[in-house]
Amino acid sequence: MRWIIALIFLSCVCCVGFAETPQLLIPKIDQKITINDFAGMHPRPDLVGKLAVVEGFVESTPTDGGVPSQKTVVYLAYDDNQMYVVFVCFDNDPHKISSAITRRENFGEDEDWIEVYFDTFDDQRRAYCFSTNAYGVQWDSRYSEANGYSAATAGYGGHQPSFDALWYSDGKITDQGYIIWMAIPFKSIRFPHGTQQLWRTLFGRSIPRTNEYSSWPHVSKQIQGMLTQTSELKGLKNISPGKSMQFIPYSSFRSFRLLDQEATPPRFISNKADTSVGIDAKFVLKDAFVFDTTFNPDFSQVESDVPQVTVNQRFEVFFPEKRPFFLENAQYFETPLDLVFTRRIADPQYGARLTGKSGPYTIAEMFTNDEAPGKQQIGDTPPSGDNAYFGIVRFTRDIATQSYVGALFTNRTFENDT
């Protein structure tokens, strides 16, 4: 009798575990998928049976565990180079779909949008997020669980929108709803080096007119954390970003004439060959580690900061990092307290970074110089004319489900320090 009870108990535990951890098997295909393959809100007949299908979205807001007002179906597949994700979002009142064609990462919460998360290291701590509105306008980020999902408010604060990946999307509003097509190249994301991959994933849809957010799997407000409620994603085999190397050289030339009014008589000072050259380089090592280096970087093309009010502010303002050299795996430098703020490195002339993750370990190293401190000092006051040198090393080790231990080393020295 005891053995029978024990077997029944173990069976129940297994069933509960399976229910709490859904699994999704993604197939590999040998053809490209486009948005036109889903005309009529259904895949082409020759694609039926070749794609993974996700249905059964569940509400998180406004009713936790409720049935969504609109049906959503997601189709997935992959080939040697990229992942395909297609959202088919049905809507009984398609004329009420709220969406606008705008610039990248500029659509609002008051628009209809979808999102997909990929936890490529299966650590339930960090994930890539790819999102679009109904017209396919892109928004992407790196999501960190450490300071992210709040079960009390079903809010997401751990997004780092400064992450900008190269991926493709398209959207189309129809008389039955809207369709979103995504193609995410493997070279745009980082994942473990190996023959078989085990990722985690989650799909979400927002309908603002009913204040509704639904997802698969269900993200419950009663459970702390979002990535712990994701589905396992299996079936990815023999994928790699390839020999991912990126070089971005630049050169600029200018010629000018200035009037020297202190001279008697005044005369023109000219420079007919003011030249500046530089390069940024990126190397992906073993799929999961990234080595970045830069020489005389040109940040003139970086998007300007949004102005902030500084009048009568007790504390200094903080601006998000947007410079490409500092963005790759920036979350690996994070600490519970903000101890690393790379915007303080104002005028680097060269630098190198190594970041990545292997199993439960993450490593982030950076060395760079900065000419700004020496330029700000006048006369012989130290550090006038000196370069500053920054060295940062961050190491963490994941423990249990949501815990970790880590260490941070930072150092700043000046060129003529004795």
Image: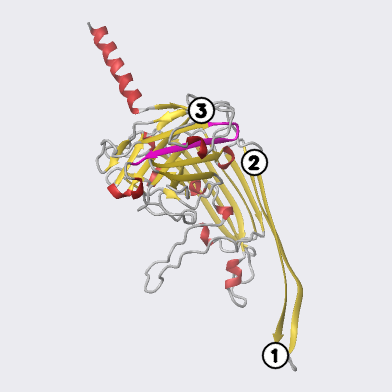
Q: Nearer the viewer, mark 1 or mark 3?
A: 3
Kindly tell me whether residue 120 is visible in this rendering: no
Q: Which residue is mark 1?
A: 262
- Residue 53, compared with residue 227, is above or below; it is above
Q: Secondary structure at mark 3?
A: helix
Q: Kindly report the distance in space between the C-alpha atoms of the residues bearing marks 2 and 1.
A: 55 Å
Residue closest to the eye, 414 or 91: 91
For residue 244, which numbered disc appears in the image? 2
> Is most of the magenta stretch helix, strand or loop?
strand
Question: Contact (CB < 8 A) between labels 2 and 1?
Answer: no
Q: Secondary structure at mark 1?
A: loop
Q: Residue 292: give x, y in percent of width and height.
A: 62, 48
Q: Secondary structure at mark 2?
A: loop
User: In the visual, does 107 lie left or right of 355?
Assistant: left
Q: Residue 225: give x, y in percent of width and height.
A: 34, 39
Q: Which residue is mark 3?
A: 47
Kind of residue sitting beneath label 1: Glu
The range drawn in magenta is 78-91
- Residue 83, compared with residue 165, is above or below; it is above
Whether residue 88 is in magenta: the answer is: yes
Whether residue 182 is in magenta: the answer is: no
User: In the visual, does 217 lie left or right of 254?
Assistant: left
